[in-house]
Image: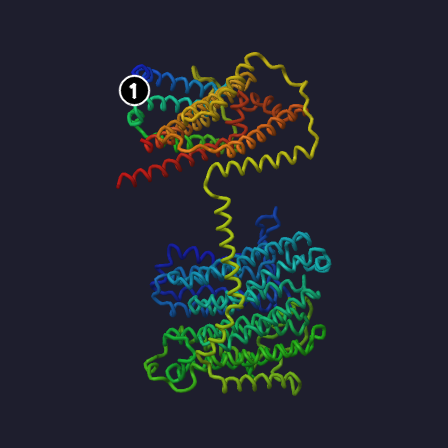
Amino acid sequence: MKSTILKTATTYLLPILLLFSVFILLRGHYHPGGGFVGGLIAAIAFVLHGFTHGTENTLKLMRRHPAELIPVGLALSALSMVAPLLLRLPVMTGLWFDEPLPVIGMIGSALFFDLGVYLVVIGVVLTILFTITQYSE
Amino acid sequence: MLIAVLAGLFVSILCIPFGKFLTKRAPAWFSLLPIGLFAYFFSYLPAIRVGSTVDFHYNWVPSLGIDLAFHVDGLALLFSLLITGIGSLVFLYASSYLKGHRYLDRFYAYLSMFMAAMLGLVTADNVLLLFIFWELTSISSFFLIGFNNDDAGSRKSALVALGITGGGGFLLMGGLVLMGHVSGSYSIQEMLGSASYLKNHSWYGLILLLVFAGAFTKSAQFPFHFWLPGAMKAPTPISAYLHSATMVKAGVYLLARLSPILGGTTYWTYTLVIVGGVTMLYAALHSIFRIDLKGILAYSTVAALGILVFLIGIGTPESFLAASVFILVHALYKASLFLSTGVIDHETGTRDITRLSGLRIVMPPLAVGGLLAALSSAGLPLTFGFIGKDLIYEATLHADDVWPTLLTGTAVLTNIFLLYAGLLAGVKPFAGKLPQHFRNVHLPDGFLWIPPLLLGGLGVLLGCFPTLADAALLKPAAESMAQNTINAPLKIWHGFNVILLLSGITLGFGALLYWTRKPSERSTLVLQRLNRISPEHLFQKLGSLLLKLSAWYTATLHNGYLRAYLIRIVLFAILLLAFRLFTGEITVDLSSLSPINAYEIAVGVILTGGLYLSVTTTSRLTAVVATSVVGYCICLLFVFYSAPDLAMTQFTIDTLTVVLFVLVLFRLPPFLNFANNSVKIRDAVIAVAFGGIISLIGLMVLSQPLRTEVSNFYGDNAYVLAKGKNVVNVILVDFRGIDTMFEIVVLSIAAVGVYSLLKLRLRASEKE
């Protein structure tokens, strides 16, 4: 798409949207949001960038291929699932720090699980979309 | 005991890392396994002799009633000794027979696995455990038949054998589970107590049918016999071991084992006697028309299996004793004949009976072994076969309930043919003049000729001194079939009576047949003419019919058009829901619904407009955009009804879907041809019907009192247990986190699928 305005705008929109997606991810435990929606928003941010600047440039910007996020996310979620086993608790027991951290808030195993979901969703959506884009070009 | 049964499996697994090493250096060392096991089982002989049994019990899956329960009685011990004893000889024999074969390690792995499965099968007390081993024998047999896997014939035979025995095994499982269900226990020993209850149960007929299906397919009874001659494509040691001495007797073993539980009824007796009788006569007659040595032996094996089924069917103490003696007799002489056939094939390169003669001059010890085995199979006095045959005639003559004359006649006729077949296989290749081209055939090394000689010699030894095996092994075996004490010691000489006369007739006619009839190519032509109505041919027809049916079914129902699949799925859902809906009462309470707001009407109008546009437009892109308008309107409705999480997710998903659609559709040409009016009307009717039914269900659900236990639980506990205030998210990441985990795994698989499918094609087109 050859629109200078959109092209310029997305350069600034990308970091804002990504920040927003992290915000959505973190607030998920108390307000509407969560890893799944957050991941979708982050993916949309990259897709928008890809539309205006071309997929090749977006991939260059990302440095690593989005598919690499999938195993990372899966591993993070799986680890947060089985981590309680180390404390001899059943799988998926929620573990929480006692004191909230500034900005992020309460940190617990559920957050890491959600972070894993977030990464997987970004990886999956971008892998599928970018692959199809490159195929149809 | 558990270790003894599973030792073969361990060895089989160890073959993967160490097999190549061992087979290169000293393959005969593998024989230590069966020899050790033989010694182990031999040590139970004194206990069995005095009539006691040995039980072992290990828990496995107690909740399902599956235990590693083993029960060693006479019958189990007889089979265990046969399996390990003949196994030892076959292991030794194969180390020389297949010397230097590329896959010798695989061979020993399969053979060890098979032996373990067979031992487990005959010692298991739990029927489900028995079934597991039963299937393992089928599977290992499949690998062994297809051992020469570069030969299309071998592969086909292996598949046929697996198909027949596996299909039977499937039915058998049903039968065994039903038995366990009815009697309330999966232990065979405990089932003995509820035998009369089982026999009077209304499911008895079904159980019998299923068990017979399993036993008859495994033991190659008519009309399922044809897989066994086909299985002779396997290397000869395998044929000797699996397809004459052990595996095919698994079905016989099962019938013998279940005889005290299910046997003794009219159905049991007549089915077994008729099927066994038909099989033995049919196969014995077949065997004399063959000219391939292994073919002759295969059909005579089927006949012998028929005799065993037939004897178990008669169900008198005499017939059980006859069966247990005949199991041993047959295993000894048949294994011996198979092994000597293997040597002949190995040394001369042919198994054609019309071309072989005079080999006694070049291979004297083998000729002695073959002769002894043939004599035992012929049932000459002072061989073990004589005693076996006497007992068979005694059993048929005293089978007062089931036509004794007819049975005896069948048995005599079968034995005449079997005698002829035995002489063909054990004497014919060695007798007569030695042809010129066999002059330089020489005796192979000891591992090849000692086993058949040993087995043949054992047949004569037991024939002269039957007491060696009688009280210690054969009587307890027969007693575990009859569940009764049997007091009839084996004797070499019964005096002059009808039985001796029948034996004489058998010998006379058999010998006459041998002297007068010369096997030739012509005799096989007779069989080929009858081939069209043989069960094998009919089964093949059935198989190709099944293939045609599935091809037709796939072509009609799975034509690859997405719209066709969608129509079928939606239509089916409509029918199912409509049936359920209109057979019940339809109550819709409109008064309980909340009033409609102005902005809801506005969204509704936009939604309808989007729908109209998407249906009527002639541009794909417009249709996609219009559909996404519908999607966003639904998001708004979610927001109105306070489901923000759902709305957010739907909104982002919708956006991405539009992007995806645009990416794909952008490149397609404009619509080339439009659906005609009748198709449009059909689709409209389906769509309206489906939408109407779903709306109706939605309205009906609203007028039902809501059950809120589940949502209340999540609402109450989200903060207490999971420290979260957003219930939806807490459910996703905590309460039902494992579901989420699997969902992201599924997503990842989808991504990998798309990536690999398209990338691979990209690479391929780049290459061009």
Residue B755 visible in the picture: yes
Residue A108 image point, x, y percent? 47, 24
Q: Work out which quarter of the rendered image holds the N terminus of chain B and state it.
A: bottom right
Mark 1 belongs to which amino acid? Lys
Q: Work out which quarter of the rendered image holds the C terminus of chain B and state it.
A: top left
Residue B738 visible in the picture: no
For disc 1, the marked residue is A2
Residue B716 image point, x, y percent? 60, 21
Residue B734 image point, x, y percent? 52, 27
Crowding around mark 1 (Cα neighbors within 10 Å: few <14, some 14 to 19, many 20+) is few
Residue B118 image point, x, y percent? 52, 62
Q: Is residue A17 above or below residue B178?
A: above
Residue drawn at (45%, 19%), measured in percent from left and top?
A24
Total numbered badges shown on the rendered structure: 1
Locate residue B666 relative to residue B474 in the image: left or right: left
Q: Residue furthest front?
A: B677
Please report, as a chain letter, where disc 1 is located. Answer: A
Residue drawn at (37%, 61%), measured in percent from left and top?
B150
